[in-house]
Amino acid sequence: MPGIDECLLEAMLLPGARGAAVVDWTSGLALGTVGDPPGQDHETAAAETAELARMAAEYPTFAPEDTADTAKGPTVEDVILTNRSGYHLLRFVETTFDSCVFLHLWLDREEGNLALARIRLGSIAERLVLG
């Protein structure tokens, strides 16, 4: 089972990957980073993406209609934000303990494949071991 560094390096193998991070969305701290940070600062990028993750995970608007599911963690799987030059993909990581962690992948818009990145990041998130 891969740890944070291995998962981030695997994410960087995706076409168009510019940077990746594992972020705790309650504190806004980056637990690991690799590549170029959006805005040239990993810690600022982590704090800002954590705000977006918190909003998606905690607002009832984004919860599934069937709220009978008692699974731990956020009900949102991922968040995709696009801009003129790139894609930002935030994938929530389910853990065995009460954790609020997500993977953030930043892709170049011209070189990246958003569908492939979403599938692969989901696979990476399932195998990620925190600890």
Image: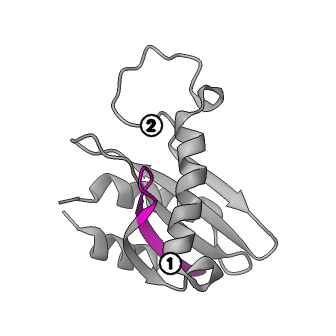
Membership of 20 in magenta stretch:
yes
Query: Which amino acid does the dot numbered 1 rest on?
Result: His
Quarter holding the C terminus is: bottom left
Left/right placement of residue 59 relative to residue 32 reads: right
Q: Tag 2's secondary structure?
A: loop
Residue 63 place in picture, x, y as percent: 57, 27
Q: Where does label 2 land, which residue? A: 74
Q: Which residues are magenta?
A: 15-29
Membership of 47 in magenta stretch:
no
Q: Residue at x 52, y 39 (%)?
A: 57
At label 1, counting other C-alpha atoms closer than 10 Å, the crowd grade (few under 14, some 14-19, many 20 or more) is: many
Q: Tag 1's secondary structure?
A: helix
Q: Residue at x 60, y 32 (%)?
A: 59
At label 2, counting other C-alpha atoms closer than 10 Å, the crowd grade (few under 14, some 14-19, many 20 or more) is: many
Residue 69 place in picture, x, y as percent: 41, 19
Name the dominant secondary structure of the magenta segment.
strand
Picture quadrant of residue 85: bottom right
Residue 42, disc: 1
Residue 98 place in picture, x, y as percent: 27, 40
Q: Residue at x 55, y 79 (%)?
A: 17
